[in-house]
Image: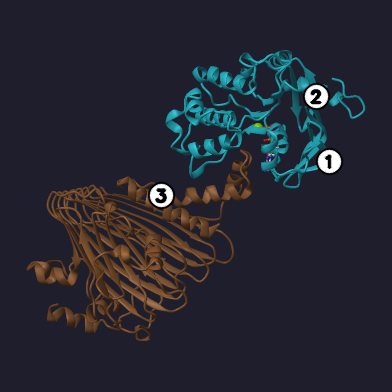
Amino acid sequence: MLEIQNLSVTVEDREILHGVDLTVGDGETHVLFGPNGAGKSTLLMTIMGFPKYRVTGGRIVLDGQDITSLPVDERARLGIGMSFQRPPVVRGVKTREMMEACLKEKGDGETVTNLAAKADLSDFLDRDINYGFSGGEIKRSELMQLMAQRPHLVLLDEPESGVDLVNIALIGQLMNDLLQKDCPMRQRRCMGLIITHTGHILNYVNARTGYVMIDGRIGCGADPHEILATVKEKGYEECVRCLLRNTPEGKVC
Amino acid sequence: MSESEKKKAQAAANKPAVFGEDIDLNKYVGAAELPPYQPDPSRLPARVKEDMLQSGVILDDSSQRSGTYIQMDNAPIHSSIRQEGIEVMPVSQAREKFDWFADYWWRAVAVDTDKYTAGVEIGQHDGYFIRALPGHKTELPVQACLYLSKARLAQKVHNIIIAEEGSELHIITGCTTALHEDPGIHMGVSEFYIKKNAKVTFTMIHSWSPEIAVRPRTGVIIEDNGVFLSNYVLMKPVHSLQMNPSAKCVGENATVRFNSVLIALPGSNLDVGSRVLLDAPKSRTEIVSRAITTGGNITARGYIEGNAPEVKGHLECRGLIMEGNGIIYAIPELKGTLAGIDLSHEAAVGKIAEEEVEYLMARGLTRQEAAATIVRGFLHVDIAGLPPMLGEQLKHAIDTSEKDVM
Ligand SMILES: Nc1ncnc2c1ncn2[C@@H]1O[C@H](COP(=O)(O)OP(=O)(O)O)[C@@H](O)[C@H]1O
Ligand SMILES: [Mg+2]
């Protein structure tokens, strides 16, 4: 279980998240909506543990362990994995090397070749990580690396943005694979927290709960399809109004 | 050789080099006692063999090489061949043997370039002569080792490499020393002649010590459709190393590639460049250099000149400053003298990007592993055209250097 309690985060001396609460139960997948600049990526980067995202209040608890001040690599080894919205290019380091490094930790018989075939990236293994990749290729490569890592908390930052219609189904497949969607809920341990700007991904992944984040605050734990319908119809303004009512005293939307 | 060359050399005996610290050659002694000829190099002392192996020279398994030349200080102590169509011998012997020898002596490098070329001409000298006969292709490399063992010695070497028409030659040269604290200087002239449709790959691994000065002087002439591919790796500290090998494409479609990987540990001063003159139509070049400092100083030069139609050149120079107060000075230069040429360069100097380290850490690598992975990636230039075995050896040399850096 992932519990985020009253989390405030500052980036370069500016508070971006103001007291965020969120709980993801074992086997559940939750979706985070919100306009550009709301702080969605900031939340994921903070859960992953990047030092630039400074926690100034609250805590992050994974399976009962307070991980708020653990370094990135230790969180990765605890089973947190993230696909980045805009990962850096790493010149000279081949995608294959990265995959091998991710797999080494696991050793569950999975192979780089297999995973690359699944992600339709067999020809990309000998290219520098993300170097000259298209938007969609970056997304698939991120998911492929996560499949090698096999995290049990999967954080996906806009996995569908920049992906064309042909490839979006493949992205959906990879996500379901990562989130063990073919596994009955009771046995599934994998948790997911997915940022989606457009909501397209809801057509492919079954998510239990959705939230809207606006200006560093979170509200509306509701059916993600309903949220999407509201946003589509009335825009995020409606959610702003809703969040304004969501005072520190009464957190019900 | 000829009187006029001796005269030119005398006149240039005190001429400083264009780049690099001006070394006082009077500090060094000339001749060392001559070590005995060694018919079976696998019987050299284990420690010597180990030093040589570090720089890529394999003496225990002769089946991995098509020829071997070893020079200890100023004397050739071994030369042998295992493949037909290849000649490997001391230049002193080649001079006696071939009446055309003078056509290749000081023709790719000017004898009066500076005091170091002059010094090689004036002093006692030998070196290797390696030639591939027309149409002959080696798969296994020819290896040459230049070993500096005597303290305060000026090691003077003059090499001639000829790839006759349609031939293919792979050479690995290891330059190394037995000295650890004592000074010494290595002065090495290498002249390459690559004829029509011939290909030479030249892999040079330098492994010196903190008091050694090194002044290689290299010239390459490439004819029509000829290919010259040079890979240079410098590992271990060195007091002062300056070189600026120059290749001249005189034939149509000639191709040159210089890759260099330089590691400057504290106390090292490196000034390393590559020069290519594209003098014939459609000739092309790529110069790629990677420089890492952990406290030493590096000047990384690159110079491409386009003097003929449809030539193409690219220069890529990247430097990484690991820590401390090392300096990397990247100087890429392009000169074009007519329309229709295509020359470009990219240069970047910086430290390891924190964003990249953290990205790898998010995949479960420790900070140390992430940094090492990035450094290794930085150092591994893509080497096309080398036989697999040499590629592996080059990779091994680079991995060894990476350990010194991390
Ligand atoms: N690394 C960063 N450096 C500076 N500002 C940042 C950084 N990351 C996020 N921000 C700022 O924080 C706010 C929230 O950004 P972000 O979390 O990326 O939003 P979202 O993902 O919801 O679009 C924005 O105003 C953005 O400019
Ligand atoms: Mg974002």
Which chain's residue wears label 2?
A: A
Instruction: Establish whether labels 3 and 2 are both on one chain.
Output: no
Q: Residue B190 at x, y = what percent?
A: 25, 66
Q: Is mark 1 within 8 Å of ligand 1?
A: no
The vertical placement of B270 against A244, above or below, is below
* Separation of residues labelled 3 and 1 (CA atoms): 46 Å
Element on which disc 1 rests: strand
Q: Residue A157 at x, y = what percent?
A: 64, 30
Looking at the picture, which amino acid does disc 2 mark?
Answer: Gly
| Tag 1 and tag 2, C-beta contact below 8 Å | no
Instruction: Establish whether labels 3 and 1 are both on one chain.
Output: no
**What residue did someone put label 2 on?**
A219
Q: Which residue is drawn at 75% across and 29% down?
A: A214
Of labels 1 and 2, earlier in sequence is 1
Q: Please, which residue is most extreme toward the left here? A: B99
Task: Give the crowd class for mark 1: few <14, some 14-19, many >=20 residues within 10 Å.
Answer: some
The one nearer the camera, B198 or B314, is B198
Lateral position of residue A97 relative to residue B234, left or right: right
The shade of chain B is brown
The vertical placement of B89 against A95, above or below, is below
Q: Can residue B160 be seen in this view?
A: yes
Q: Which of marks 3 and 2 is in front?
A: 3
Ligand 2 lies in quarter:
top right
Which chain's residue wears label 3?
A: B
Q: Residue A180 at x, y = what percent?
A: 64, 20
**What residue did someone put label 1 on?**
A57
Q: Does the residue labelled 2 lie within 8 Å of ligand 1?
A: no
Task: Please tell me how many numbered marks the rendered image carries.
Answer: 3
**What residue did someone put label 3 on?**
B381
State which quadrant residue B273 falls in: bottom left
The chain letter corresponding to cyan is A
Quarter containing the C terminus of chain B: bottom right
